[in-house]
Amino acid sequence: MTAQPTEALSGTLRLPGDKSISHRALMLGGLAVGETTIDGLLEGEDVLCTAAAMRALGAEIERDENGQWHVWGRGVGGLGEPDNVIDMGNSGTGARLLLGILASHPLTAVLTGDASLRGRPMARVTDPLAACGAEFIARTGGRLPLTVVGSRDPLPLDYELPVPSAQVKSAVLLAGLNAPGDTRVVEREATRDHSERMLAYFGATIRRSEIEIEGCMASEIVLSGQPELTGRPVRVPADPSSAAFPLVAALLLPGSQTRLIGVGMNPQRSGLLTTLQEMGGDIEITNAREEGGEPVADLLVRGGPLEGVEVPAARAPSMIDEYPVLAMAAAAAKGRTVMKGLGELRVKESDRLATVARGLNLCGLEIEEGPDSLTVEGVNGRPPGGNNQPIQTELDHRIAMSFLVLGMASERPVQIDDATPIATSFPDFTKLMQDLGAKLTDV
């Protein structure tokens, strides 16, 4: 696919549902008693794999003709052993959270995924989960395919996160649902709290407090085990990670004015907004409200110049998925943008840090890649673009969309090698961007 230089974007966009919340809504709906209805579920491949997985474990899941999803759960501890291998596709979030659920169920299951997911490490989840009594048999490096033998008498967990990770935290809490007593997680740096919010919304007792460890403040999250979760209506907000692409594209194209409706505004997901506003981005937050336990708002975005900034490492957990597209904004900004604390990017769907750096070089940008940092010298206008060979996206949806955004704002077209992975998180990306005025072609 190729992105041609575009003059301006305009229009109103209702974006796909948040992927993180969509996964959790299906999982907690499957663990609840009664019916859960879900509006705005992201119908990308990752989330559909989670729906198929929960069906395989015994939950009833249907989509009606109006696009609303219905889940009839089995109750906490009530999932059944699957008849076949569970394929999680490309979804690291789905796989890691599901391992947490399976760890405290008395069943045996085998998880696999696509080539990208099979290369990603699972040990950071399976190591703490083993303490509840589960057994895991995996390939070298804790990789899929992986067999989990869930505990028949699960123990509550007490775990301090060695590095910030919402996926690990969520997996531990989900395992604790079917264990007696309290499961406790301590995090020294705040991570996304979608699991805590949704667990409370479905009826779990979960408490967060601040504690002191070695002279520093940390968060303690305590979940009371074996609750009865009750099916609830869930409205999934627009995914801020998906919103990042039209948001940055509009900022980079002078004359643009776009409105993004119902975007999730969770404080642990707002790092990109904060950074773009520090760069001078014209982003107006309107109609702030709360839906299903999550804050949401509409964003009015206008194109204009940006200035390079230094993004602190402490902000990384709140925007880890958005650094690739931020790097595209940095390419067009005036001056140098320095991004730190990016080590986790090396173990995403691809080594995103190396892939972004390599692609920006191909597009004529000056960059410096460190072990966990990226520095981009902005050109104060349209980047050169015109890569003489397609950007290798490494089957990574966010890399693909990021470089298509760069192409819209460049002097010459930018071509990527494969746009098919975009369907994992943003299946209507091409059409919705074209509706705003983007020039995207299949070749």
Image: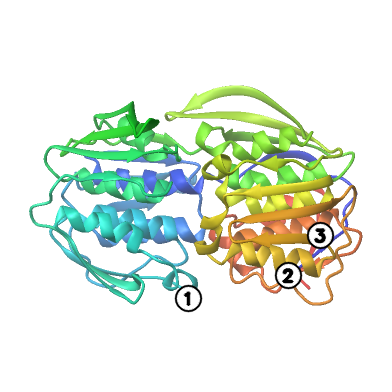
Distance from label 3 to label 2 (Cα)? Answer: 10 Å
301 up-or-down from 335: above or below = above
Determine which of the numbered discs, if any, sits on residue 336 in the image.
none
Quarter of image, res 430: bottom right
User: Judging from the image, what secondary structure is the residue with disc 3 in?
Assistant: helix
The amino acid on which the numbered mark 3 sits, given as a three-letter code, is: Gly
Residue type at mark 2: give it: Ile
User: Disc 3, disc 2: CB below 8 Å?
Assistant: no
Residue 213 picture location, percent across and down:
33, 33
Please count the marks in the image.
3
Q: Residue furthest left?
A: 153
Disc 2: which residue: 416
Q: CA distance from mark 1 to mark 2?
A: 19 Å
Amino acid type, mark 1 = Ala
Residue at 90% across / 49% down in the picture? 381
Q: Residue at x 59, y 42 (%)?
A: 240
Q: Compared with residue 30, is residue 412 higher up or lower down, i.e. above or below?
A: below
Q: Identify the residue at image location x=45%, y=40%.
A: 191
Residue under circle 1? 115
Q: Position of residue 395 (x, y in %)?
A: 59, 70
192 left or right of 330?
left
N-term mark: 3 or 2? 3
The one of 62 and 435 positioned closer to us in this rendering = 435
Residue at the disc numbered 3:
407
Vertical order, 164 against 396 (above or below): above
